[in-house]
Amino acid sequence: METALVYDEEMTRYKLLWLDPDCEIERPERLTASHEALVRSGLAARCVSIPVRQATDADILLIHSEEYLEAVKKTPYMTLEDLREFTLQYGAVYFHPNSYHCATLAVGAALQLVDGVMTGRVRNGIALVRPPGHHSMRSAASGFCVFNNVAIAAKYAQQKYGIQRVLIVDWDIHHGQGVQYAFEDDPSVLYLSWHRYEHQKFWPELRESDYDSVGKDKGAGFNINVPWNKVGMQNGDYLAVFCHVLLPVAYEFCPDLVLVCAGFDSAIGDPEGEMCATPEIFAHLTHLLMNLAGGKLCAVLEHPANIFQGGYNLTSLSQSVCVTVQTLLGYPAPRPADLQGPCQSALESIQCVRAAHRKYWSCFKHAAEAPPSDISTKRIKLEEKGREEKLQRGEGVESKDGVTWPEPQKCVPPPVRTAVVIPEDVASPEGCKRFSLSEHADSLSAEEDFDDDAVMSSLTALVGKMENNEICNGLALVGDISMAMAPVIRHATALKQRVLVVCVGGTGVLSHLPEDGTALAVHVSKEAPEEPQLKHYIPVRLKNGCGHTSGLAQATFGLLLPLAYEYDPALVLLARMPGTDGASDCAWQQLVGLLQGLARGRMLVLIQRDDKALVSPTSASLSGSPLPCLGRLPAPLAEDVEALERLRRRLQVDWLLLRTSAQKSGGEDN
């Protein structure tokens, strides 16, 4: 299964025909720059090209009114003066004689992508379209948007393929009010948007863009707005929203399809967005979303970036688009640059969102109250300058105003995706390569040769191959997991490379962890001790162990992923410990998939030798196969939530990405 690229140069063939400073930034180059970057990098050639079609009236009427459609259909025949007059009734938009044609192609491109994904022709994909869509409303154009491409795609997927639930994630820097209005009373569509808001002073300047606009009637709780009330948001702010807001809700919702309003004006270098998230963060956002809905993900371009003479932000745009497509293709995600904890303003927004939605989602049941009015995101005074947190880092790409950022790491996929160290009597999983210490043998030749010493040597050699980018990840059956970890940790830490050790289920404390911080262990189990016995050992106790999927999910999103991203390991060592509280196969596969976003995909998974049945599902996850869905998650046990909150409060002093509140409050969440 492959990745689709939907694009047609015809969508560049309209432009502003009169003088309008507000609309001047909407140019054809906003689209061509994205496509040219994919062609130059060779990524376009790796994708499946899907032709664009025109949307039908029936397609457009899934969201828009007949009166509005008929009015837009007349624009190709209008004079220049008529077009200007027609435009005046809408906000921040213009029309050209070719606008209607291009708008139908933009909708059709999104629908072609949905068809490709839903029929299984491709696994995922991106549609490069113009005009964008997420601002367009039922009977109005807005914000350069004529028809609402993603909203139509969601309705189309539900109608044609009978899917029950659609997740729409809008990471454009502007609020997609058109998408919100289309589904605000619909519980079958979960819409999350983060957007520059600045207390209703940033376009579209709507009261409905704030965190307490949660949806209406049956759709209450299914509209999630995360307002950015200052500029300069960085990678940690974006990841904090995913870990503490989006992922918990998305897994509880369990979508059948994920649609992304992919606006890259939220990246560093865009003069209107004024944010500081570097391009590689979009690889991680994409990776985390790919674990949902069996991998069915459709990204549709919204506002790519503003184009100004000199085009410095085109560098950020091209990097952002390319790392997103690389991730869709299965490339390892680059390690995130300069990852810090969320700022106070972001924490205020996260706290308010969680408080506003705690009566709708069980994952937020113990969230803190919103901050008091004197510091709330609705009333806090805007800072006059607001740009003090611009990134100022070393060498990299430099913009006109001195903002710099490093280029994303080049993540070339190694020739071998997954290597396995298994005895000969275990069938080699599809798509995996057997690995042994001997350079001349294709496998360990016999069961009697599969002794612990041979396995230990093979694991060390396998990690060396990962470091040389010859192998991406690996899986090994071992007799004693604790014993097998020791040489791997020693090998990696001897090179001063940080190792994240994640143990799932079972008992015992890892006694061979180095004390210099080059290894961090997180152990999730019902037998985990209440307090850590080693400085770099974090026990996470769940009442019913990892077999209770909701508790494991809560621990993963609220603790494990934030810790892992902030630690930024060079290698992930994941162990399925022996015992009776192990995760279900589906939950285990999800964990394997989520953790592959770290360490450029370098992960070694250890499984007890008598758990041979886990080889196939684990290797499938490591090889990039679509992950099974967990189903709609019930509420986690109250005891687990309370234990996780106590642990998070204790750890957040040192681990800033664990924070979800701007200040101490009377709620459970501090």
Image (cartoon, rainbow, N blue to C red):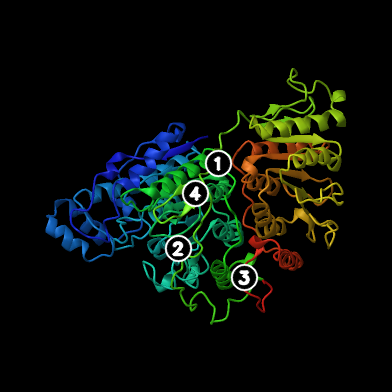
Query: Which residue corresponds to mark 2?
Result: 195
First in sequence: mark 3 or mark 2?
Answer: 2
Dot 4, crowdedness within 10 Å: few (<14), some or many (≥20)? many
Dot 1, crowdedness within 10 Å: few (<14), some or many (≥20)? some
Q: Left of 217 or right of it: where is 431? A: right
- The Cα atoms of the two marked residues, 4 and 2, are separated by 17 Å
The image's mark for residue 661 is: 3
Query: Which residue corresponds to mark 1?
Result: 409
Kind of residue indicated by mark 1: Gln
First in sequence: mark 4 or mark 2?
Answer: 2
**Which residue is located at x 64 percent, y 51 percent?**
630
Kind of residue indicated by mark 4: Pro
> Which secondary structure lies at badge 2?
strand
First in sequence: mark 4 or mark 3?
Answer: 4
Mark 4 or 3, which is nearer the eye? Answer: 4
- The Cα atoms of the two marked residues, 1 and 4, are separated by 10 Å
Residue 203: x %, y % from top left: 36, 66
Q: Is residue 531 above or below residue 609?
A: below
The image's mark for residue 665 is: none
> Which secondary structure lies at badge 3?
loop
Residue 402: x %, y % from top left: 44, 55
Mark 3 or 1, which is nearer the eye? Answer: 1
Kind of residue indicated by mark 3: Ser
